[in-house]
């Protein structure tokens, strides 16, 4: 087993901590996007009835900014298509 200096150990520890933090942040972003998508699907179902597979696919592939914009548009939308205009 090769000798690891204290400086190397500190570097390894800092690298592990940084990797963990980046992983947690990515997880939070994915969770937030999934939550926003689930809420939008629920709102669409309540206002217009069950969403089509096309609508579900569009929401599932959208980024967080689009989901927030679409969620705001549901307030004035008269049809599902108005949400995505």
Image (spheres, rainbow, N blue to C red):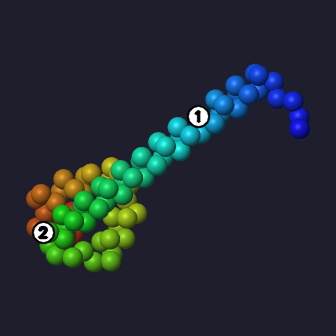
Say which element carries label 1: helix
Q: Based on the displayed image, in which of its 4 quarters is residue 33 positioned? A: bottom left
Q: Residue at x 37, y 64 (%)?
A: 60
* Nearer mark to the viewer, of 2 and 1: 1
| Mark 2 closeness class: few <14, some 14–19, many ≥20 residues within 10 Å | some
Task: Give the residue pinned by disc 1.
Answer: 18
Q: Based on the displayed image, in which of its 4 quarters is residue 19 positioned? A: top right
Task: Give the residue pinned by disc 2.
Answer: 47
| Mark 1 closeness class: few <14, some 14–19, many ≥20 residues within 10 Å | few
Residue 5 lies, with reference to residue 85, above or below; the image says above
Q: Residue at x 33, y 64 (%)?
A: 59
User: Can I make out residue 60 in this image?
Assistant: yes
Q: Earlier in the sequence, mark 2 or mark 1?
A: 1
Q: Is residue 76 left or right of 81 when viewed as pictured?
A: left
Q: Position of residue 43 (x, y in %)?
A: 18, 63
Q: Position of residue 66 (x, y in %)?
A: 31, 54
């Amino acid at each position: 087993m090769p000798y690891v200096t204290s400086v190397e150990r500190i570097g390894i520890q800092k690298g592990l901590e940084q990797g963990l933090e980046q992983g947690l942040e990515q997880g939070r972003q994915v969770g937030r996007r999934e939550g926003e998508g689930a809420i939008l699907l629920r709102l669409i179902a309540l206002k217009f009835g069950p969403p089509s597979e096309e609508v579900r696919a569009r929401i599932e592939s959208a980024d967080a900014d689009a989901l927030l914009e679409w969620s705001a548009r549901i307030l004035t939308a008269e049809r599902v298509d108005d949400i995505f205009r």
